[in-house]
Structures are given as structure tokens and as C-alpha cells.
Amino acid sequence: MTKNSKPDKIYKARIIGSFFLLAFLLYGIGRNFFESEAITEKYIGALLIITNSIVVLFIGRLLRKTIQQYNVWVGNIYLFSRVFEAIALTSVLLNLIPTINISIDYGYFLAMLALGLGSIPMCFTLYKQGIAPKWLATWGMIGYTVFAFGFFMELFGKEWSMYLLALGGLWEITFAIWLIIKGGKDEKAFFRQ
């Protein structure tokens, strides 16, 4: 692909958008079930958390396909942040082993910090290359910066994330809807490039 040419759409945009929304549901419901005292609900929660991590990996892998056409490093950073997020979120399942008792929140804080930090350069690439509307990409850069800072402070015992995650969380929902409406790229054309 030449520097002046660019795909007119994000590869598998509708799937990525659906996965963004699905991840919210899977982790939110999964964590709620996992924190239950009922063993059946705990295992259902564990299954939902694992499924969420798989969805998160697919988001990273699919979105990387578009981002790496402009900047290989940013594509790889984004994918790595999603891999780290998936592993950190799944780490809570270690609590199923009777001799292990780790904080459910610690893995979540690390996962969200990695997601925030890895998404800032991704949003900058969306902005710089005109892949997404400027207002949406700018919102993403600002939202993820605030989001990451909130979760960074959580690691020092400052309960700031709940006050600073809304901007990034709302961006993800808006971006997901934009991806679904915008539509996917023709697969055959993508692989001819």
C-alpha cells in the first residue's frame, strides 16, 4: 500500500463494533456472577470472563489489521495491550484454586491501564490518518488518557477510576456504534492489497 492510499473502511468494522459492545456485557455479567457465593454462578461467571478475554483478543487482532497499514508499531502496541488486558482480566480465575486468593480488582486495574495506554496511539493513528472522524479520534485520545490515569492511580490506592472512566467508556460505546453503522471492508479487496 502506498503512503497516499488508504482503505476507505476499517477491516471487519461491524464485527469489531459488535465485539466492543459484547465485551462490556460479557465482563460485566461475568464478574457479577463470579463474585457470587453460589458455585454454579461462580463457574458461569468464569466462563463469561474467559469468553470476554477471547473477544478482547479478537478486537485487538482485527483492529490491528487496519492500524498496521499506517503504523506497524502502533498496530502491534494495540494488539499487545489487548493481549495483556485479556490475560489480566482472566487472572481473577486463579481464585478458583482454593489455595490462591488474589484481589479481583488488581487484575482489572492492570487490564484497564494497559488498554488505556495501548489505545492512545491507536486513536492518534485514527486521527492522523483520517480513518475515523477527527472528533471521534480526539475524544478517544483524551478519554483513554484520563481513563489510564484513573486506573494508574488505583494502583496507589487512590479510588479515582470510577470518576475518570466514563469518558473512555462512552467513547468505546460510541466507537462501536460508529463501526457498526460505518460497515466493514470488502475482504477480497483487503487481501489484494
Image (cartoon, rainbow, N blue to C red):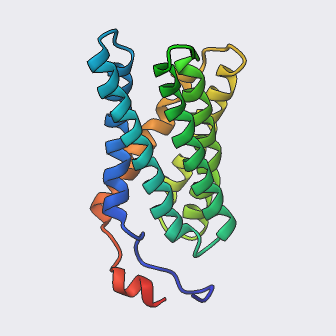
Question: Which quadrant of the figure contains the N terminus?
Answer: bottom right
Up-down relation of residue 46 to residue 133 (above or below): above
Q: Nearer the viewer, residue 102 or 85?
A: 102
Image side of residue 137 versus residue 10, left or right: right
Q: Nearer the viewer, residue 170 or 88?
A: 88
Q: How many numbered marks, from 0 up?
A: 0
Image side of residue 15 versus residue 133, left or right: left
**Residue 133 in sight:** no
Up-down relation of residue 107 to residue 129 (above or below): above
Task: Estimate the x, y position of residue 44 in percent, counting from the top left.
Answer: 29, 27
**Residue 12 in sight:** yes
Task: Estimate the x, y position of residue 68 in percent, counting from the top left.
Answer: 59, 70
Task: Estimate the x, y position of residue 26 in percent, counting from the top left.
Answer: 33, 36
Residue at 55%, 40% in the rendered image: 87
Up-down relation of residue 16 to residue 118 (above or below): below
Farthest residue, direction top: 37
Residue at 44%, 55% in the rendered image: 59
The quarter of the displayed image where residue 32 is located: top left
Task: Estimate the x, y position of residue 54 in percent, counting from the top left.
Answer: 42, 48
Q: Nearer the viewer, residue 191 or 6?
A: 191
Residue at 69%, 22% in the rendered image: 155
